[in-house]
Image (cartoon, rainbow, N blue to C red):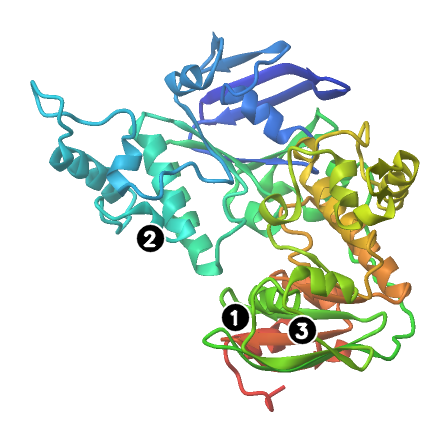
Amino acid sequence: MAEVILSMKNIHKRFPGVYALKDARLELHQGEVHALLGENGAGKSTLMKILGGIYKADDGDIYIKGKKVDITGVHSSHAHGISMIHQELCLAPNMTVAENIFLGREDTIKGLRFVNFKEMNKRARDLMDSLGLSIEPDEIVGSLSVAQQQMIEIVKALSVGANILVMDEPTASLSKKEVEMLFKTIEELKKKGISIVYISHRMEELFRITDRITVMRDGQYIGTKLTRETSRDELITMMVGRELKDLYVKSEHKIGEVIFEVKELNKKGILNNINFSLRKGEILGIAGLVGAGRTELARAIFGIDKYDSGTIKIDGKEVQIISPLDAMNNGIGLVPEDRKKQGLVLIRSIGYNITLPVLNRFIKGPRVNKAIEEEIVKNYISKLSIKTPSINQAAKNLSGGNQQKVVIAKWLATNPKVLILDEPTRGVDVGAKAEIYGIMSMLAKQGVGIIMISSELPEVINMSDRVLVMHQGTIAGELKRDELNQERIMHYATGGMKHVG
C-alpha cells in the first residue's frame, strides 16, 4: 500500500449558528485520486479550506507524511506542498500563461530588477511539456478555453512544488472533450506521485478516475470505500442517510392547452428560425451540445438579449419582450445557468433575494410592510425546504442546492406561467437534485409550463414530457416522451437529419 501522505483527524469547525465540521477526517495516499463526496453543506469545502489555510480548525490534527503540522494560512499550506484549484479559477486574464504561473515569483535578470521573460517562458514551457500540454507560454490567458485555464492552474500549483492538489468541481464548466483532456492530465499527475483530492457530484467521473471515495454528511465523516468495491446506490445511501430509490420525481398529470409559443425566432449567427410551443403543465426539455444555442435561446426569450426577428405569444396573444421586465410582466421567469453571478445577490440575505422581483407587494411609497415580506419569504423557505438558520442568512453562506432553491423561490414568488430552468441541477448533490426534481414536478402539476435546458441526458430523459434537440442554433429534432433515449438525442445533437428517428 502507498505511503499515507496526508491525515486529517478529528477536525472540528463551528460558525455562528452552525456546526460545519464535527469529528471530520480524511486520509490520502501518495499518488492516489481520492474523491470527497457528500451533499452540499456536508462540510467538504470547509474541510478543504482548513487544509488550504483559508479557515483555521477549532480542534483536530493534520499530519503530512506522518509529521504533525500547523497550517496557519494559505502560505503555510503552500509551504507544506498543498495547493487548491477552486471552481472559480484565480487567474489574471490579461497576463500571459508564464506570468500567471510565476505571479509574485518572477525571474529577474541577475543584478537588475527587470523580469527575465525568456527564462520565465522556458521554465513554463518545461512544466507544461512534463504534462504533455501544447499551450504557448506567451499566450494571453483570457484567450484560452476554460479547460486550458484549468491546466494553467495545475501547472501553477506544480511550479511551487505542490504534491497534494485539491480539485473542487473541476469539470463543472467543461465540454466532454475538455473533460477527457483533464482526465489525461490527472493520469500524468498520478504517475508523478502527486496526490489529488477530487470533489465532484458526478458519479460517473468518480468511478472512472478515483481510487477511493470518502463520504461526508452533516459535517461528519461517514466512511471511506475503495472505488472498485462500491456502487452508486451504496454511496448515495451513505450521502443522504437513506436509500434514494426515486431520484427522478416525475408526476403523471394531464397536460393542458398551449400557453407559450415561439415562431420564426432569429438572431444573426446564433439562432436560426426557432419554432416551438409549450403547454400548461408540460416540462419541455431542451438538449444539445455546448455551443448549440440553448442558453442563447433562453436569454432571447427572457429579453436579456435582443433577437432580430420572430414572434412570441402567451395564451395566444402576441407580446413584445425586449427586456427582462417585459418577460416578468408577461409571466415568464428564468433560473439562469450561473446562479452565483446571474441569479443571486450573494452578500444579501435569503429574504432580500426571494422578494427582489416582488417588492411592490410590500413596499408602498416610503412604507415597508415587514409582515407581508416575512410571510412571502417564510412561505417559500417552507415550500421548497430551504435549509437555513434564519431568513437573514446571507445567500453566499448557503450550500449550492439551497442557493438554487432560493433562485427558484424568487421566481415562484412572481407566480409565473412559464418558468425557464437553465441547468437546474448543475453543481448540486444528488439529494438536492431529487428535491429540485420534486419542485419541478409540483409546479408542472399546478399548471406551470417549464422549459428545462440541461446537459445531463438522464435528467432530460427522465424529467421531460417532450424534448427539443438543438444543433448550431437550430432545432434539429423533436422527441416525444416514449421516443426518448440517449442515442436519438445525440443523433440530433450532432447534426443528424430530422427525419431519422
At x 58%, y 68%, the residue is 294
Instruction: Tell me if mark 3 has few (under 14), some (14-19) or many (20+) residues whose alpha carbon lies within 10 angstroms of its own.
Output: some
327 is higher (above) or lower (below) than 205 = below
For the residue marked with disc 2, what is the amino acid?
Answer: Ser
The numbered mark at residue 470 is none
Secondary structure beneath dot 2 equals helix
At x 84%, y 46%, the residue is 384
Q: Which percent across, then down, holds residue 161?
A: 32, 25
Tell me the quarter of the image containing the C terminus: bottom right
22 is higher (above) or lower (below) than 315 = above
- Residue for badge 1: 292
Q: Nearer the viewer, mark 3 or mark 1?
A: 1
The numbered mark at residue 143 is 2
Residue extending furthest toward the left: 111
| Mark earlier in primary sequence (2, 1) | 2
Q: Is residue 484 visible?
A: yes
Secondary structure beneath dot 3 equals loop
Give the Cα separation between the discs numbered 2 and 1: 21 Å
For the residue marked with disc 1, what is the amino acid?
Answer: Ala
The quadrant holding residue 462 is: bottom right
Nearer to me, 134 or 302: 302
The numbered mark at residue 485 is 3
229 is higher (above) or lower (below) than 413 = above
Q: Which percent across, then down, holds residue 320?
A: 69, 74
Horizontal relation, residue 437 to residue 26: left or right: right
Instruction: Tell me if mark 1 has few (under 14), some (14-19) or many (20+) residues whose alpha carbon lies within 10 angstroms of its own.
Output: many
For the residue marked with disc 3, what is the amino acid?
Answer: Asn
Q: Which percent across, then down, holds residue 464?
A: 75, 69
Horizontal relation, residue 464 to residue 212: left or right: right
Q: Nearer the viewer, mark 3 or mark 2?
A: 2
The quadrant holding residue 274 is: bottom right
